[in-house]
Image (cartoon, rainbow, N blue to C red):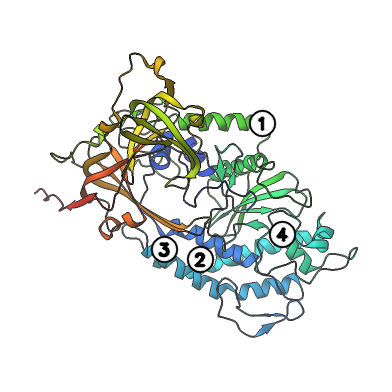
Amino acid sequence: MPVIPQPTGVHARSRRRLSASSLVTWERCKRDWFLTRRLGIRVATHPEMLLGHIVEEAVTAIWMERPHPCDGMDKGDSKWAPGHGGERMEINSLDSLNEWLRTLMRPIVDRILEELQDDWSNCPWRADGRSVGEVKREKLNAMIKNAIKLQINEARACLEANGGPHLEAFRNDGDPFGTPAPCWDEAQGTGWKKSGEPCSWWEAWEIARPWAKDPRIVSAQRLFHPDGWAAGELDVAHRWRGSVHIVDIKANRGGGRDHSGVAHQLRFYQWLWKETRNHPKKPTNRVEEGVVTEIKSWHLTDGFVHEAEMIEDLDAETNRLKSVQDEMASTSLEDLHLDAEEPSSEGRLGCGICCGLQTCDYPRGGQEQPLHSLIPDVEIKPAGTPYGAIADLPSRVTVKGTLHGHWGPMPNHYGDHVIGAAVTAGDKTAVIEEMGMGQFSQLHQHEGDVVIVNAAPGQWRGMIRLYLDADSQIISQAEADGLEIDRIGLIPTRANVSGVVISRGANSGTNAKGKDWSMATAHIWDGTALTEVVAFGRGRSESFDNLQVGDRVRFMAAEIGWREGTPQLRIDPRNTRMTVDPPPPKSD
């Protein structure tokens, strides 16, 4: 990875942090951004949405192959999809290397199809009428051929440039970059020539191998802005020229399509690369890698290469992007105006095309695209007592007490490293912590008798929690004259809600410490508002995992929590009860 990520969990994807994909969505439609990025509402999964990641991993695995020119290589013997080796094949040029790599196509495509089927089977919400059988082997064959061709072309260019400016550094001690290009074999290999000799085809292949996301690493391989407000996970960086070419891999056709979205994405990566060169956790290079001089996308279905225009003034772009991130961070549910009946460009989340429950269609938006409803227009209202409306979920509270017991930074349940403390009033104590990483960094500057203003109330593992963000304050008790104070012991920490499931999601993996994690989500809408319900680890029951979009559900004693400034309900496996109601009778 080009920069060691900040010490967050694998699934720590802050919904306030600026990324390439969130920026593209924001610039297309702020309303769509809030629903899909901030609130996390998903759309039904199509096979193509799963295919991209698998194909990226497959082509990286091909580029990680190290040929053995003396002994040759077994045909079809892919490190990524082993067990298909055939007769021995001599490799003595880039042309014969190209031919050998193409023998890997069958086992690699077999594995792509296997992983696609597994991911599809485990997907909690699949698009109606779609199946992985629609992904044809011929299309995958074309992608693998083009991935091989495009990287062989890089190696040819490197050979023609006599290995580029880093040839002798590679010969002396292997890959000179602090984060080397991933390779299946350890060490630097034995095919290097003596100093002063012309670059060989083998050396050109090794030198031109790009940095790419290593398929053996299960944790995220992101670039993090040193100040934490932006991050991105780019696909490929070629560094052999003494400058950097950033490439985004696309598992689609490039010819004849609109490339404006990917151009925004590539320019974000150009900016982020520059911003992270002095990151304190960036490994040291033995050579000067240079600046980014090209940004492009490789479209594997037809081998099309799109080169985007670069940012000329990176300092001005920093100011622009920070203002965008600040605006993103300051948005709230009240800015959504779900009751609006006419489009409007006024307001933070206004849009000149969509309004109310209607949203610009994914992926391009615009007048020519049909609108769709991420929140379905169904006849629904909250269930009766003891269930309340989602719109009436507890908002913010103000409490007073003694602040003590400072701790952190420590990972919260999303893996974000946050700081916290405790606040005690009489015989009642609550844990107080940042709502997310860096969202109330001044918490440890306070202690003793204080008033905590505009805290978000909740509960986690049976303990009252108060979450602080940019809307919160800690003041002295003398400054709090006239403020209405809530008693810690009476703060609502659980909720009973009902609604219809409008979105489903799930994720799992292994964190940086090797510990497995999992979570499942369901967004529910009750006609008054919507909220996200989350089940972590052992809180994931079979009935929760089997929820379907359209199910009408009731949750009793769900824990109140918060994420990125919006309320969230969490399943407590000991106390929360979920009931799935039968569907309403169809009207004649």
Structural distance between the alpha carbons of marks 1 and 2: 42 Å
Count neighbours of disc 1 (C-alpha within 10 A) and say few if under 14, some if 14 to 19, many if 20 or more.
few
| Numbered label tally | 4
Q: Tell me which label, 1 or 4, sits earlier in the chain.
A: 4
Count neighbours of disc 3 (C-alpha within 10 A) and say few if under 14, some if 14 to 19, many if 20 or more.
some
Residue 119: mark in rendering:
3
Tell me where residue 295 appears, x and y as whole percent: 65, 46
Q: Secondary structure at mark 4?
A: helix
Residue 154: mark in rendering:
4
Q: Secondary structure at mark 2?
A: helix
Is 484 on the left or on the right of 313, as rendered? left
Which residue is disc 2 drawn over?
139
The three-letter code of the residue at mark 2 reads Lys
Of circles 4 and 3, which is in front? 3
The three-letter code of the residue at mark 1 reads Asp
Above-or-below relation of 30 to 481: below
